[in-house]
Amino acid sequence: MERLHTVLDSPYGPLTLVATDGVLSGLYMSDQRHRPAQETFGERDPAPFGETISQLEAYFAGELKEFDLPLRLDGTPFQRMVWDELLRIPYGEIRTYGELAEILGKPGASRAVGLANGKNPISVIVPCHRVVGANGNLTGYGGGLDRKQRLLVFEGGGMGVGVSGGEDALF
């Protein structure tokens, strides 16, 4: 298993892209909660990231609303179910943790959905920032609530979304 990484500057700070056997397996922000140790990212080599970088640059320029990239999402079966559902949330829209739990057929599992959301290894592309608390407040984001709010406003889906740092903050 070969792992390589590169770093891309973005409007939200540096993004570390990680590929496992040539497939994107990580996109981490600086100071991101649940960010793996740097030494697990492999050698620095931009070669496998050309299309990912092109699509991210188009997204940040407001020219791309849906990514079309092969992804390697390593996690538990439940985490992968949550991450697959995140990929179905359209650009500019938000869902609550409870709504995702309902969609997954587990209506009492909103906290488990939140925990899986927080362990998403490919932020931005797998849009965990599009999930909010039951009352519409921002309730946590591995990259920080400020970045989450900025991403939502950028996409047009976060107008009027408040910030909550209370016990609902899962990550």
Image (spheres, rainbow, N blue to C red):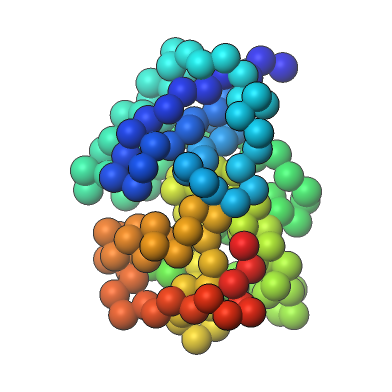
Quadrant of the drawing holding the C terminus: bottom right
Answer with left or right where residue 154 lies relative to residue 51.
left
- Is residue 166 shown above or below 15? below
Quadrant of the drawing holding the N terminus: top right
Q: Position of residue 127 (x, y in %)?
A: 47, 54
**Residue 8 placement: quadrant:** top left
Residue plotted at (57% across, 25% down): 19
Disc count in the image?
A: 0
Of the pair 100 and 123, the residue shown nearer to us: 123
Residue plotted at (51% across, 38% down): 27
Report the residue that reaches farthest toward the front.
31
Q: Position of residue 81 (x, y in %)?
A: 68, 55
Q: Do we see residue 102 in this rendering?
A: no
Answer with left or right where residue 50 lies relative to residue 20.
left
Q: Do we see residue 74 in this rendering?
A: yes
Residue plotted at (52% across, 61% down): 141
- Is residue 153 shown above or below 52? below
Q: Position of residue 71 (x, y in %)?
A: 56, 35
- Is residue 147 shown above or below 114? above
Residue plotted at (39% across, 62% down): 146
Q: Position of residue 100 (x, y in %)?
A: 60, 70
- Is residue 25 shown above or below 102? above
Of the pair 10 and 152, the residue shown nearer to us: 10
Of the pair 1 and 35, the residue shown nearer to us: 35
